[in-house]
Image (cartoon, rainbow, N blue to C red):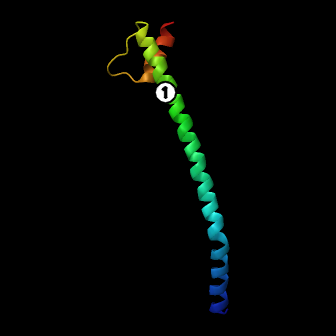
Amino acid sequence: MNYDILIEAYKVTSLVMFPILVFIIILLVRDLGKYSKLSDKIDSIIKDLSEDLEDKGFKKNSNETILKHISRYINKK
């Protein structure tokens, strides 16, 4: 087997695959950005819900997470 042919084939393959890989990485980053924005929106809604519960008199314990606070309220009702 001639190593020059192998090296040339590797160079051609890398020239073709590099832009494809960059494109895939760009799409991945854009998708992750969308999920991050969605996660922030959900987090703010849950925080607002917990604050509304506290305003109505259902106090949050100091060692309790927001989700446990809401879960405890739902279980109480």
| In the image, residue 12 above or below residue 3 | above
Q: Residue at x 66, y 76 (%)?
A: 13
Horizontal and vertical percent position of residue 68:
44, 21
Instruction: Count numbered badges in the picture.
Output: 1
In the image: residue 68, left or right of residue 16: left
Q: Residue at x 65, y 86 (%)?
A: 8
Q: Nearer the viewer, residue 38 or 2?
A: 38
Horizontal and vertical percent position of residue 34:
58, 42
Horizontal and vertical percent position of residue 37:
54, 38
Q: Residue at x 66, y 65 (%)?
A: 20
Which image quarter: residue 19?
bottom right
Q: Secondary structure at mark 1?
A: helix
| In the image, residue 62 above or below residue 33 | above
Which image quarter: residue 24?
bottom right
| In the image, residue 60 above or below residue 3 | above
| In the image, residue 58 above or below residue 50 | above
Q: Residues within 10 Å of mark 1 (few under 14, many from 20)?
A: few
Residue marked by disc 1: 44
In the image: residue 56, left or right of residue 5: left
Name the residue type under label 1.
Ser
Question: Where is the N terminus found, in terms of image quarters?
Answer: bottom right
Q: Residue at x 53, y 29 (%)?
A: 42
